[in-house]
Amino acid sequence: MTEPTTLVSAWKAAQAVLKTGRIDSPAIDARLLLEAATGASRLDILTDPHRPLTPDQSTALDGYIERRLRREPVSRILGRKGFWKIMLTVTPDVLSPRPDTETILDIALLAFEPAQSFNLIDLGTGSGAILLAVLSERQGAHGVGTDISSEALAVARENAANLDLDGRATFLRTEWAAGFADTSFDLVVSNPPYIPSEEIPGLDPEVRDHDPLLALDGGPDGLQAYRDLAPEIARILKPGGIFAVEIGWDQGPAVKALFEAAGLEDVKIVRDLADRHRVITNGPDPRTTPIRQG
């Protein structure tokens, strides 16, 4: 008689299959897919490892593993992705948020006190990840997310509602900051498309085949969005305001020059946890300033 499949045996088997398929982080991916297929939590897997799977749960897990082997990201399979301390719905219409982008949060939380009132704008908001993560940490903040994709804005609005942040978050279909008044925001954040067009075919399938091209393609040299953003950010930022914009790892000097040419001052390049250039900002550098807890 065949032994029943249990949480722990299913996890180990899924790990092995993903590892053989050369999938990055097979243990984490296998656990997330197992949790989704069975409704079990990470704690359940640790404390009740021999809980048997039902036939339907085994079938669901097999289907998830097959999709992952075809290089579909876990966030696309599950329709959700964790970012900072929040969980977001993600669809094919929005970029799946990356941990690298959390560098923007490090800067924003240093720049504004926990109880401080301020307003921010997230240009090209996508799923609303950056805006909603800031609002979740700073109760006095109100913000706007803009995007040219109506479908992306629908996802962002859903995420705001799910997080009970829709009372402090507004979303508007427009190109970058078009339509907003001069000197109107204390904080401007953005994760624009910055991959050179010719490099997109060589990206990992998880990105190339599953993230929207609109959120990836930065034009022939990858810098077009920054040419558009720099003067707009200089225009809408209040005196003494802070901006934080994600960049590609090799774009720091070029983007810094574009922002300085637009009249922005104290522009610096901030590195991420992997020690790569990640954000252009005039705000505090998390590497040299401890983050306030609030």
Image (cartoon, rainbow, N blue to C red):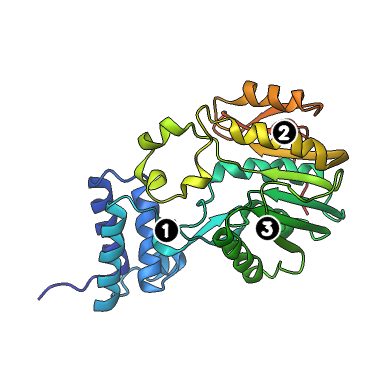
Quarter of the image that includes the N terminus: bottom left
Q: Position of residue 112 (x, y in %)?
A: 82, 47
For disc 1, the neighbor class at 10 Å (few under 14, some 14 to 19, many from 20) is some
Q: Secondary structure at mark 1?
A: helix
**Residue at (67, 58) in percent of width and height:** 132
Q: Position of residue 113 (x, y in %)?
A: 84, 49
Circle nearer the N terminus (2, 3): 3
As measured in the structure, the alpha-carbon distance from the residue carrying label 1 to the one carrying label 2 is 32 Å
Q: Is residue 54 visible?
A: no
Compared across the picture, whether 66 is left or right of 164 comes to left
Q: Which mark is residue 20?
A: none
Please state which amino acid type lies under the numbered disc 1. Answer: Arg
Compared across the picture, whether 236 is left or right of 107 comes to right
In the rendered image, which quarter is residue 227 located in?
top right
Circle 3 is placed at which residue position?
A: 132
* Residue furthest left in the image: 1
Q: Secondary structure at mark 3?
A: helix
Circle nearer the N terminus (1, 2): 1
Circle 2 is placed at which residue position?
A: 230
Taking depth in this image into account, of 223 and 101 the one nearest to the observer is 223
Camera-near label (2 vs 3) is 2
**Residue at (67, 53) in percent of width and height:** 174
Circle 1 is placed at which residue position?
A: 76
As measured in the structure, the alpha-carbon distance from the residue carrying label 3 to the one carrying label 1 is 20 Å
Circle nearer the N terminus (3, 1): 1
Please state which amino acid type lies under the numbered disc 2. Answer: Ala
